[in-house]
Amino acid sequence: MNSLVQDDGFEYLANEEQYQSWITPFDQPIGYLGEKELSNANSPLDFLSLFLSDEFWNLLVIETNRYAHQFLASHQLQPHSRFHQWSDVTVSEMKAFFSLHLSMGLVEKSELEDYWAEYWPTATPGFGKVMSRNRFEMILSFLHFTNNEEYVDRGQPGYDRLFKIRPIINLVIPRFSAVYGPSKQLSLDEMTIAFKGKSTLKMYNPNKPDKYGYKVFVLSEAKSGYVLQWSMYTGQNRPNGDFGATHLVVRELMAPYTGKGHEVYMDSYYTSPAIADELANNDSGLCGTVSSNRKGMPKGLTREQLPLSKGDDPVFMRKGKLLACAWHDTKRLTMLSTLHSNTCVRKRIRTKHTDSGYREINRPVCVDDYNSFMGGVDTADQRMKTYLFPHRSRKWYNRIFNGILSVSMVNAHIIYCRCTAAPHKPLKVFVQDVISALLEGFSRKESNKGRKSSSLGDMPQRLTERHFMCQADGKPDCVVCSDRTHPKGRRQTKYMCRQCGVGLCVVPCNERYHTLKHYKKCHLDG
């Protein structure tokens, strides 16, 4: 190491140093850790059950029924309220409810009731065969995860802002790290659970695709995106001390993986010399972008002290295990790493400013690795939102529950791909298999049946074929709006459907006859 000038304990590096990594070689098992359930894990539902166990389903049934009885006992219902028909939900019915819940992420419609609509071009008759719309909406209204009678008021000892969803968090989230051993490289970032309703936990971030929602700190496997740790930001006061809130977040998320030779990649929101030193002392590496004005960073790498232009060579400084780097490519970048030396790699990248369309740059190895391993949380976020339950809810905790359910589904698919021989089912087929498995052994209760939904095979030909209007011979009655049983109820028309051979008014009866199963319009309705 050829040192030049010292700056706050950091030394400039002039020549390429021969740097020996201090991290213990990573020899941890990668993939499934061998829980007892693995011997029976054959289907997609078996892998999802690693997180959504029998205890999970029993909790949903007990708390949903409890909340329904509490609500019915404390409210005076309207005479025509659907809640008069409430009957306690069972485990098999709850699984059927969530099979429809997951199906709505595969077939997105604008309104919840559209899944039970009979308009034939967009009909989804399978929903009505599983559960009536009234029953689905009743379960959704009473869906609950905790006993309201145990709520502790704000300001009292034991108050919890996540009280409504805490049992699900405590039951599901620890299973993520318990059943899976990650590879060496980890990624730490944040997710946003989109929500625009009223909630004191909701935040606004204009730089995110979902600008309004809940902030969740996530630690994931860098390559696969498997979520290992999940911690929701509640805005509560952090303990006083020398460390900032983000330092404590990294410490909390990395606690199960320190001392095992892991490498964690993070952005400038979390990276600091203090957390890098702490992880290094616990045999864990760190690499990430960092603000040059962070406490403990050398002043010589700030913009004022070190102006850099595009194409300039990177500047490195070292302090013990810490390596700081300043580099300007498309924009100014400052890196902090305990994993790398000051070596660079020659990269050929695209540009519009040369005749060949390419230019060569010296990219620091720490930047190259950061680009390779930083996107784990973004990968998980993208996959979980592909088939997320699409409909809004006024209840803030339902949205968080949907997020946890989606993360569980993505994690189950990753373990399935690790534990089964190729070719693997894509996530969409995996979700479809889970839906089918949840419906096994369930039959819709006759007492809960509403009007039968029609399948496409039952649709009359007038709803499925192409039709053209033509001028009729004479003036036949319109089959939609004409009704001779009422005085002055007869309606004649000059037009008819060529294919169906019936008289029809051009507007609106033609459209009504060819789109509605029950098309007849009473004369008294106009």
Image: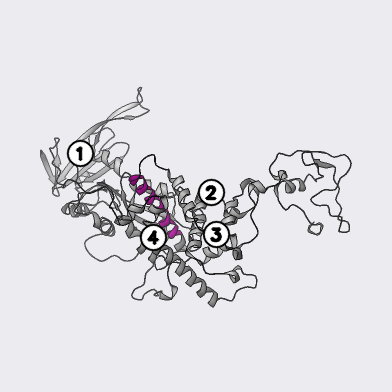
414 inside magenta stretch: yes
Instruction: Tell me whether circle 2 and circle 4 mark residues in contact (CB < 8 Å).
Output: no
Instruction: Tell me whether circle 3 and circle 1 mark residues in contact (CB < 8 Å).
Output: no
Q: Position of residue 261 (x, y in %)?
A: 20, 49
Question: SS class of the residue under badge 4?
Answer: loop
Q: CA distance from mark 4 to mark 1?
A: 52 Å
Q: Amino acid at mark 2?
A: Val
Question: Sequence order check: which comes first, mark 4 or mark 1?
Answer: 4
Question: SS class of the residue under badge 1?
Answer: strand
Q: Which-is-in-front pick, marks 3 and 2? A: 3
The residue that disc 3 covers is 443
The residue that disc 1 covers is 315
Question: Sequence order check: which comes first, mark 3 or mark 4?
Answer: 4
Q: Is residue 237 above or below residue 227?
A: below
Q: Is residue 83 above or below residue 427?
A: below
Q: CA distance from mark 2 to mark 4?
A: 26 Å
Question: Sequence order check: which comes first, mark 1 or mark 2?
Answer: 2
- Residue 519 appears left or right of 485: left
- Residue 133 appears left or right of 12: right
Q: CA distance from mark 1 to mark 2?
A: 52 Å
Q: Residue 107, which numbered label?
A: 2
Q: Which residues are magenta?
A: 399-422
Q: Position of residue 349 (x, y in %)?
A: 32, 30
The residue that disc 4 covers is 53
Q: Is residue 205 visible?
A: no
